[in-house]
Image (cartoon, rainbow, N blue to C red):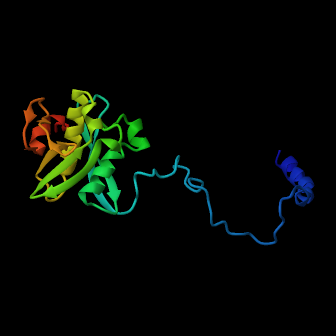
Amino acid sequence: MKRRLIATLIILAPALPACGVPMDERAQEITDVPFGLLDPQASEPPEANSPTEGTAVQIFLVDSSRTQLIAVERRSAETDLPSVVEALLGGPTRAESRQGLTSAFPDETQVAGVDLVGGVASVNLTADFATTDGPTQRLAIAQMVLTLTGRPGVGRVSFTLEGQPIDIPRGDGTLAAGSVSRDNFREFLPSG
């Protein structure tokens, strides 16, 4: 078998230049190697919403049972509150989606902005948020509160709807006026 392979190569070698395959006398270095070609373990390119450089920030996503929130890491060049909210609204990566993680925020149109005054982050929701069902609203509020209170200097979170203050659904389903803290959503965190 080995002898036949060598004989075939000897016969085909003179035909290669005629087929358009260049015959260089020296090896040439290839600088643009397609992603994953040199790493047999890599199966897909890096995801757009998970940069590899920058500062780590923690956001919370909804698990497949829709009863718990799971902390995941994002890397961001900016760690101000609007950038952290943007990372949260970006939702799960493809890998996280395959693990069953989702977001209660269907898209970024439900949040108009976020400000920080005296340790209280104020999140301005849009009218789109009001059309979301109650259990999903509670999950979204919990995602936002747990994400923002994980940032330095943020102890509580308040919410407005189109600029008007609203009562906030706590983790237990009761409503709170003013602002809420991380403690109001402990039931969404994994035990242990």
Q: Name the foreground residue: 12 vs 69.
A: 69
Tell me the quadrant of the picture where the C terminus can be found.
top left
Name of the residue lying farthest toward the left: 177
Name of the residue lying farthest toward the bottom: 26
Say above or below: 3 vs 176: below
| x then y, percent, for residue 25 | 81, 72
Question: In percent of the image, x 31 and y 62: which residue is there?
Answer: 78
Q: In which quarter of the view is residue 57 placed?
A: bottom left
Tell me the quadrant of the picture where the N terminus can be found.
top right
| x then y, percent, for residue 70 | 26, 40
Residue 117 visible from this viewpoint: yes
Q: Name the foreground residue: 97 vs 127.
A: 127
Residue 68 visible from this viewpoint: no
Q: Name the foreground residue: 83 vs 92.
A: 83
Say above or below: 27 vs 69: below
| x then y, percent, for residue 159 | 16, 44
**In the figure, is residue 189 to the left or right of 36?**
left
**In the figure, is residue 113 to the left or right of 100?**
left
**In the figure, is residue 3 to the left or right of 148?**
right
**In the figure, is residue 150 to the left or right of 66?**
left
